[in-house]
Amino acid sequence: MKVLLVAACLLAVASAQVESSMVPGARRGTFLNGIQQMLINATATFYPDGENMMQTIKLAVMTARNDLCKINNRQEVNNPQDHNSIILGKTCKKAFVKLYNEEPDRCGGVFCDVLTDFETKTKEFLTDLISAEYDSDFFDIIEESFINPIMEYSCRCSGKMMDAWMGCKKRIGDADIWFTMMNFGGFDTAAEYLGGMDWKDFWVDLVANRVPWEDIETMLERTMANLCQRNTDIRKGDSKCYTYFYNAFNTLYQAYMKSTGLTPAKRGRGGKSDVPEDCTRYDLTQFEGVSVMNLTFGDIKEAVVDKFCVEECADFYQDEFLGCCTASMVQDEALEESVKNVADEIKEIYVSVFPEDEAAADAGITEYVGYYNDAIDMMRNPTCEDTNVSYDMTPCTEGDMSVDGEDPCAGLSGKAAKKCKKKQKKKGGSDDGDDSADPCAGLSGKAAKKCKKKQKKKGGSDDGDDSADPCAGLSGKAAKKCKKKQKKKGGSDDGDAGDCAGLTGKKLKKCKKNAKKGGNTDSAAAGCEGLEGKQLKICKKKAKKAGK
């Protein structure tokens, strides 16, 4: 895991120019060459002698690793897992140790894994990025070394890790790290925002109670459910939605190159793109003279929507940007609500600490939530008034591509997995039973509705074999006629031979035949059901004698 590499890449933008023997792999003049130049500067800053990480960062990583890797170090004598944690405190350390000891995922060991990889693999990762000759190589390295490991871990463990944190955060104040930060972090322990509270008490309360953890938990749960599900637009294999979105990002990158006039680093002559020329060249002439770094989503939204509505481009946009993975994400109202709640709550926390920035914080949140709303609205129902273009926005979990035996809870963990399993149990009984009697078992959404409608037309119940009931599936007058006809035919199928008393001829033979097929009744008189006139009187008389 190399999560902290993100910080290294971001710091590259602000890093000073440092002499280095490293050379960009992409040809001069391409946009990728410029990115690689920044990465070279970052690498030279973090590795001053070309090999060893700068001392301050190395010391911080080593301190954190020595503390958190005790979670992964189980021994019979003087077990490090039982020691206190400076960073996590005793309660949270115990919670994550428990997760680490649960095989096969060992989710709680992620802190040690991230720090170890950061210390040992960052240089190699940056070198590979700098050496990439083409855009495709650059993005493949990021996907294989960064995106895939993060998402594979997150799909297995994010829910479990969040559950552990939610259960232990109330005791995070026990960690010794607070005193270290207060004494050596250069913080103003008498700042006005503290409102007279002790510095440690203020920040422990903020982290444990004021941060909107419940909304964050929902946001994480729903995001992982959407990203980790199978992309059912693809019939074969087990392609996940996070791969779909990463590929969509790559396509957007190529479109960005075209629309802004930047040069991509592509194989072949002229640096041609794999993306359809006309469908991804957006009209940005009205922003001529504006730096591409200053363009916002609001600026380019109309240009993008214009391309959505071109009939020749509809198939491309449906496949690349508006597949079932996108539909699942944008139609997830719980996710949408949690994102907005988290944004509002974080803004309130920020303003409470930096009240002088309240106006800027309000404007920033309003702007970015506005972009989010615009993007969601645009993709939730992408229709075009002037053309006949429309898009299928069916979520993956509700599509017609359901795979037999597929587990709808696959990819979930923690509370999300428990909720899903509970929901599935209510839908279709035990997971251990045979669902062969129910052809709609395992389906949901549109697929389930279609299946049930089809079964209803066939005339049977979903609960079993209806061959014993010739009236199953009928309603109204047809049902009444059928039941009346069955009643006249000879009563209950549940009788035995003793119930045929009073019958003669063909009716007696038929009754005995039915009784032989099976079924008992508690009353001999039940065999008289369906008889009329003399036959009924004789039957009742004999039944009465039999009961004496």
Image: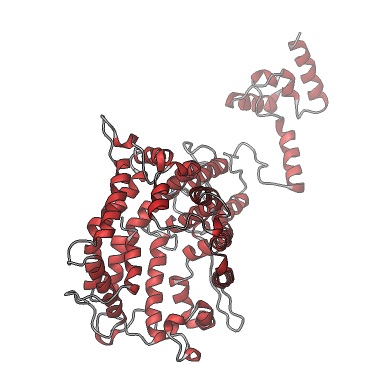
Image position, residue 32 (x, y; %): 29, 78
- Say which quadrant the N terminus sits in: bottom left
Total numbered circles: 0
The residue at 25%/61% (across/down) is: 122
- 463 and 205: which one is in front? 205
Residue 366 drawn at (x, y percent): 58, 70
Judge left or right: residue 542 versus residue 372: right
Residue 143 falls in image quadrant: bottom left
**Is residue 195 left or right of 86 when viewed as pictured?**
right
Q: Is residue 231 visible?
A: yes
Residue 424 vs 18, above or below: the answer is above
Nearest to the observer: residue 472 or residue 394: 394
Quadrant location of the C terminus in the rendered image:
top right
Which of 384/302 is in front?
Answer: 302
User: Is residue 309 visible to the viewer in this orientation of the structure?
Assistant: no
Indicate whether 242 appears above or below 277: above
- Residue 410 rendering spot, x and y as whole percentages: 43, 49
Q: In the image, 1: left or right of 479?
A: left
Q: Nearer the viewer, residue 42 or 133?
A: 42
